[in-house]
Amino acid sequence: MDPTGNGHAVGEGELPVLTRKDFTSDQEVRWCPGCGDYSILAQTQKVMPDFGFPKENIVFISGIGCSGRLPYYMNTYGFHTIHGRAPTLATGLKAARPDLMVWVITGDGDALSIGGNHVLHSMRRNVDIKLVMFNNRIYGLTKGQASPTSELGKRTKSSPDGTVDRPISPLSIALAAEATFVARSVDTYTEHLQQTVERAGWHHGSAFVEVLQNCNIFNDGAFREFTDRDVREDRMLVLEHGKPMVFGKDRDKGIRLNGLAPEVVSLGDGVTEADLLSHDEEAEDPYLAYMLSRMWWPEFPVPVGVFRRVSRPTHDQLISAQLESAVAKRGAGDLQSLLKGGETWQVS
Amino acid sequence: MTATKESDQQRAPTVQELDRVTIRFAGDSGDGMQLTGGQFTRTTAVYGNDVSTLPDFPAEIRAPAGSLPGVSGFQLSFSSSDIHTPGDEPDVLVAMNPAALKANIGDLPRGGALIVNEDAFTAQNLKKVGYEANPLTDGSLSAFTVFAVPIGTLNARALEGLDMTTKQVDLTKNFFALGLMFWLYERSMEPTLRWIEGKFSARPVIAEANRRALKAGYAFGETTEMFHERYEVRPATLPPGTYRNITGNEATALGFVTASKLAGRAIFYASYPITPASDILHQLSTYKNFGVRTFQAEDEIAAIGSAIGASYGGALGMTGTSGPGMALKSEALNLAVMVELPLVVIDVQRAGPSTGMPTKTEQADLLQAMFGRNSDSPIPIVAPATPAECFDYAIEAWRIAMRYMTPVLFLSDAFLANGAEPWAVPDVADLPSIGVPNHTDPATFQPYARDPETLARPWAVPGTPRLEHRIGGLEKQDITGNVSYDPENHHRMQVLRAAKVAGIANDIPDLQVAGPPDGDLLILGWGSTYGPIRSAVERLQAAGKSVAHAHLRHLNPMPRNTGDVLAAYRRVLVPEVNLGQLLWLVRAKFLVPAEGLNRVRGKPFRISEIEDKANEMLTGIPS
């Protein structure tokens, strides 16, 4: 049966060439001036035309928090839902409408605190959604409480003496939940962000993208130590598939495996690129990606890029396949005989 | 065979014709009592009796064997005339062990028949439930007609030679009891033999064991001299049609598949396992060749969230649960209220609060359905009155949801869900379409423009060119649907949402009255109290009393004439399996001094309880 109802044809007709402007809605953007969200919005709007998808077939679904406003600014279909539940709506929508491209926009509180369960399960089901999590390590919309990614001991309005909760690594969680695409980028590293969002968009399956995003009001400079333009080459590791893990302004440092742990080494003095770990985003087992997800400044450069990208059947594909196989085995359902069931009798 | 015939002639039991019989099977929760009762019900329904059932089982899957908490029961009433309830009290109690006897004997009236599995009355089993002496021999059961049958021993003998463990053999003794009951009530074994054939086709030894057990029980009835009478209950004269036996949960699932066909939209049913609603998920998950997508969600919230997502995409998104799950869904329900998308939420009510008594019935979620969300949050509510009616109201729920672009709550309960009755299978070709079109015209599109008649907003699904728009939980500006904090707009939208739901009253049938249009007493009910109320009213009317019955299927909004109906009687009685929730609503809404009859025992009302209360109220009325 046509899931859209009434035989409405989906995405028919010619594909016009679209530009960023076509994806910009008429709503005034209302984030604080200087917020990292502007950059994420801009990169997202920029990459949309590249997918060649009719814009009516693209849906942005968000939860609650500053990030939740993004769908209002996208001139696609958009649904600003309730706190933490965006992945659930996306799961139902994608199951009913496999033809749509579905994005989930969320934040560190929305995705990892109130909505943690749904992130876990949408990832393990490989629901074909592109989840972009804005991580600013703070609750912004509620004006500055600690989030699940806030560093231990952080003083906030809700933790004047410092938090007593250890933060979690979003990407470790995504990997543990079997996400088939796991990546990280930074709001101010725009060309990298654009690339990362685009690669997530092309992925079939559950994509989890963490964007390190600056909240200049409640947690200004949360990532400055390693994301500032003048230090980022030395303090971030840009992952490239099939390439050795080299970083540094002078490309003179790298990551080597020592026993079961990574270590930073300087190239030269007998250490060559051949001694370094080589990045393999397509590795079936998640160990390398998991190790990378635990690396953080100042012990290590912070890895950005695609940690993992593997191919598995998506949730909606598996659902549709079961429906097709049921029809193949039993024929399209006959309602009248279904209603009669096994045993009937006549009264005349 | 000749010998048997002679002995038949010697002591052939007389056949007594009865209008109605109520049987209760009771045993350990591992004894297969639900299966036994279900088989007797099927056979009896196929034979053409009217039948009504009350399964009553513990939440524990296997409580300690032989203990009182582990007792599982199945009561069914069958008749040659139209009946509405599974019977107040059994005529026959089949007790498979001392615990089953102890838990149920209080319900057996004096003179009732008691069939017990004598083998289970061991010193150890008696002690487990606190019997100091064996009730089969100490004279304490002298008020009843007791048939002590060594069911276990006889059954084991019948299965001799089969390659089975003692435990496996013991598990078939319920079919011995079933066979005996088939003989006693002159039922054919054929439907059950066919069922065994289908069920155990891959396990021939188990199939043979069950066949032998069933036939041995039947043969025991035939050959023993214990029973002097057999009973016949002739087929009932139901309206012409093709009938089947159906439970409320089955009817609910079939109603949704039918709604899908009538709407021309696919089903997406999401649910988290919860008693007593899980069977709807189980059943719908077997209808994939009807395009039914089912989704076992990670929790109750994900279930409703995904259902809303599916409806947003143009499918029939729905979710089923019970009271505790309803509580978890309330925030998402309000999202559906705000974004005005169609959605159906099934609450198969059970005894609460909290986890309560998960397998027992109650109808105490009505006020939760009405009010259990933040802010003013109007949601239409429908409630079927009988198991078969679950089919009709599943379709009605979807008709309202789509026509008015609103979530709809469907209140069933454990009694309806598990109870069974004959159902005249409708001809699909006779059922009217409930389809509504998607909005597709960009020239006239405004996300919150309303149909002037229904006040419904357009259903514009993703994938429709040039209708790209944004919705969400923030307050909407009237017509445009843009986010709005304008005070006057918020007031207008609150009033519009309420008016939309209230207006459904113009689109539902008037409240019907069975009995005089005015008079001394009106008994008003809703949901599964229909059977006992209707039976009580029939008895009262037969006794010449001025009593009428009205039953609400639409709880929000109520039919337009509800207030007039209530005002036409001197007194109004509202029996409910809660502490007075519909009572509270009608008193508040219609300012009538209605009175309640409220019993919350996890069981349906007895007919006599309602009859007694009505008589008490009638004696207070000066004629």
Image (cartoon, grey):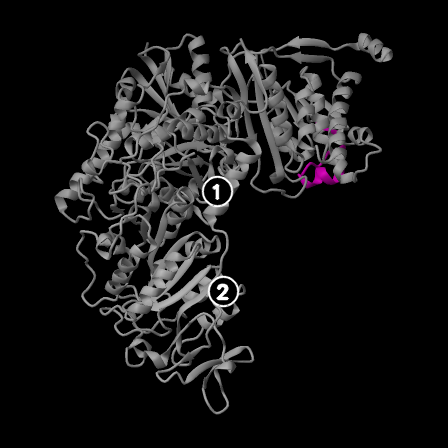
Q: Amino acid at mark 1?
A: Ser
**Which label is found at residue A142?**
none
Horizontal placement of B143 versus A253: left or right? right
Determine the chain carrying the residue at label 2: A
Q: CA distance from mark 1 to mark 2?
A: 26 Å
Determine the chain carrying the residue at label 1: A
**Which label is found at residue A282?**
2
Tag 1 residue:
A320
Q: Amino acid at mark 2?
A: Glu
Q: Does residue B125 belong to the magenta stretch? A: yes
Point 31% across, 75% down: residue: A227
| Vertical arrangement, residue A160 with respect to residue B475, above or below | below
Answer yes or no: are tags 1 and 2 on the same subunit: yes
B133 or B208: which is nearer to us? B208
Q: Does residue A16 belong to the magenta stretch? A: no
Secondary structure category for the residue under label 2: loop
